[in-house]
Structures are given as structure tokens and as C-alpha cells.
Image (cartoon, rainbow, N blue to C red):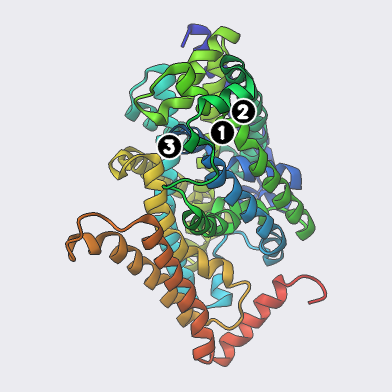
Amino acid sequence: MTPIDYAVVVVYLAIVAAVGFVVRGRIHGLEDYFAGGRRLPWWLAAVSHHISGYSAFAFVGFASVAYRQGFSIWTLFALPCFVAMMIGAFVWAPRWVRLKVLTPVEYLERRFNLAVHQLIAWSGIAVKFVDEGLKLYSLGIVVAACSGVPLNAAIVGCGIVAVLYIMIGGLWAEVITDFAQFLVQLAITVVMALAALSAVGGWGGLWASMPPEGRTLFNADYNLRYILIYMVVVTLSYNGGTWGLAQRFYSIGKPEDAKKAALLSAALYLLYPIIIYIPVWAAPAVLGTVEKPEEAYALMAQHFLPAIMPGLLGLFLAGMAAATMSMVDSDINALAAVFTKDIYQRILKPGASERALMRVGLVATAVLGAITIGTGLLTPRLGGAFNAMMDWYAGILPPVAVPLLFGMLNRRTSSRGALAACLAGFATFGVLRYVTVSVLGLGKALSWTIFTGGELLVIFTIFFAEGYLFKMPPKEAERAAAVLAQVAPEGE
């Protein structure tokens, strides 16, 4: 990077920080800070939902798959996200608005009981640390590759900036900057795609440069069974299992607008990844062998952008950093909301004033951010960005997400079923992923499809079977009926 690139990074991040101070005037209480006052325009929420769904991970973890496996990354990444959001547009997005909640787990006490509410709140916070660490690690990879800054220093620096930023502007600052980041990111990725295509002789040259196994929708590693199981995980995550994404829906004022937001997000997921991965598909022809596939996109950016325009590499890095930090901010904001409302106010100090809760929210943001930085530093020990995401996040998300999402759809399951499904899910993941190796003496871990698919089967079976095998207590049945009536579409 040149001095011009570094100057662009500094100016860009300063502008982003200024947005946080400007929109700070919109924050008059917890609802504004954690839910945007429920006034988010649907198109702004849609773009924020979309860009919050991948961050730098798409340019690191998934880019490593695109480099090794070719076009099947579209089937692995884009198609499941598209299907998930099409389902969500008609099932969950409008229901999140009708719940009228300030946190994703708030309604669980009404639907089930306090025990389920607290279990999902605490375990969900723990789950998110893995996800947030992945994002910071992915951003650190890009920053380190482009600037030469040591990886750990990049992770810590980006994490500190992210925490300070979220403490300033709340949800409004996030979604407004998300929109700006998307426009910058779109411009840079289009330029990169056109430059890569020009270097390899157009789309035909790109296709010819890829090995035969790289031109297929599926391959030996990511076959149809793998994709279908991953599609279930993505559906759970993108429709609310990832709390920051649920926040984008319940911060919209009208159910029909939430539906439109989900549909726009779906369309972006279907098409935009093709633009993103053209440079990675072209990398072997342009750069030769890339020793660390996670760095493929960043290395292509270094190859093309400085020659196109001075400062463009800095703009790419700044946009990537700001977008990822905004995504981390979003999730930390949701985590702080859950801790403040669902744990501190509900359990520790029920009579706390809104002013006191705002202070708790700020402290929680700082502490949760520090833990997130720690998990980012530990991510390499989990096998890198993609392996950590698939093994850990995909493994520990479903026990939290299934009761959260299907509790608003299924009136039969009681608090017993929700608790049992959650606990059994975590236990199944631990047994299939680790105990089978250490205790049973298997030579290697079971495949991802077996331990993740087995975990999903256990969770869904327990969650739904309990409602048919056992009768729900009358008072709990009344609460469940009230919640489902609240979220049901008009006329049902």
C-alpha cells in the first residue's frame, strides 16, 4: 500500500465515525439504541441485512473455497442464502415485526417460560462469540495481506475501533453506514471482476482456465447432501438465529415492509456472489499458485487496484474494514440488548431505570467486544475461517435457533420440549464431533454432514415430538396461543 492508500483508509474511517456522531441525536432511549425506534426503511434494512450476512468472511473463508473448488461456491454460499431469505420473507420476517420486541429472545418467556428464556439468552451469547471472532479474524486476514500489519495486531485494532463505534451511534449508525459500505463494496467488486475478466480473456477465457471439477454446481466435498444440510443451518441463521439479522426485521415498522426487505436481500444473495468470486476464480491464471487460499481475493486486489487508480486499494481495504466492523457492531449491539434487557433487567435488577439500563448497555458492549477480540485471536486454532464457521458455528447455532424460530410457528411444543431440544442439541454436537474420536478411538472426526445433520435431526425430532407425546399445561397453552395469535398474518 502507498501513502495515498493509507490516507484514503484514514479519511474513509473518519467519515464513517462521523456518521455515528451525526445520528447520535436520534437516540433517546433503549428502543432507539437497540431497535432504531422501529423506523428503519425496508430498503435500508434489506441492504443492511444483506451486507451483515457475510462481511469480510465472504472474501476470506468462502473465497478460499472458491479458489479451491470453483463455481460450486455459488451453490454453497449464494443458493442457500437465497432460499433461506425466500422462506423468511413469507414465514419469519413479518412475524418478527408483529412480535414488537426489543431483543430477539424477549418473547420466549411469554411463549415458554423463564428457564427457556434464560437458557437461550445465555447460550446464544456464547454462540455469537464464535461468529464474531470469525468476522474479526477474516477482516484481520484482509488487512494483514494488504497492509503488511501483523495479523493479531490487525484483529485487535479492528476490534477496538468496532467497539468504540457501536458505543456512539447504536443501530441507526450501523444501518446507514452499512448502506454506504455496500455501495463502495459493490463499486470495488465490479471493478475487480471486470479487471479479472479482461486479464483472462473474458468469461470464455475464465471458464476455460478452470479445471473441469471447478465448473460444476456440486463436487465431492460439497455434494447435494452437504448443501441441503447447510441450507437448513443458513435458514436458521439468516432468519433470526443470528440475532443481529433478526434485529433488522423487528426494527421495521410494518410486516409487509419486512417481507419486502427479505425479498430484496434474497435477490442480492442470488446474484452478487458471482461478481465477488470472478477474481478468485481467475486467481490461478493471473497469480499462479496461491499458497494461502484465504488471501486470494486480497492478493488479486493488490495486483489490479493500484494500477487502475491510486488510492483504490486503500478504498477497498477501508470499505472492507468498515463493513465488517459494522457487522460486528450489529451483533454486539444485539448481544448487549439481550444482556441488558433479558438478563440484567429481568434477573439482576428488575427496577432499573432506563438511564441505568443505557449505562449497563454501554458497559456490556465494551465487555462483549473485548471477548469478541479474544475469540478472533483464537480462530486460527479452530482450523481457519471456513473450517471454524462450518464446524463450530454451524454446530452450536441450531440448539439456540430452533426454539427461537419455531416457537413462533408451533403451538404444541411446551417449555419441556424447548429445553430438551436445546440441551440435546449441544450434547449431540459434542458427542458426534469430539467424543466419537477421543472415547471411541475413531481415526478421524465424523464428517460435517454426519455430526451436523445428526444434531439437526435430534433437535427437530425432540422439539416437535414432545408436543404430540405430552400435553402442555393449561396456562402455558394459553400463553402459547396468545403469542401465535399475535404473530399470525391477518385473517388466520
Disc 1 or disc 2, which is closer to the eye? 2
> 172 above or below 150?
below
Front one among 478 and 217: 217
- Contact between marks 1 and 2 (CB within 8 A): the answer is yes
Circle nearer the N terminus (1, 2): 2
Query: Could you say which disc has been placed on residue 185 in the image?
Result: 2
The number of numbered badges drawn on the structure is 3
Circle nearer the N terminus (1, 3): 3
Residue 124 position, x and y percent, is 45, 59
Would you identify the image quadrant in which residue 430 lies? bottom left
Which residue position holds label 1?
323
Whole-angstrom CA distance, mark 1 to mark 3, is: 11 Å
Which residue position holds label 3?
136
Whole-angstrom CA distance, mark 3 to mark 2, is: 18 Å
Front one among 61 and 411: 61
Residue 129 visible = no
Residue at the image point whose x is 51% and y is 19% from the top: 301
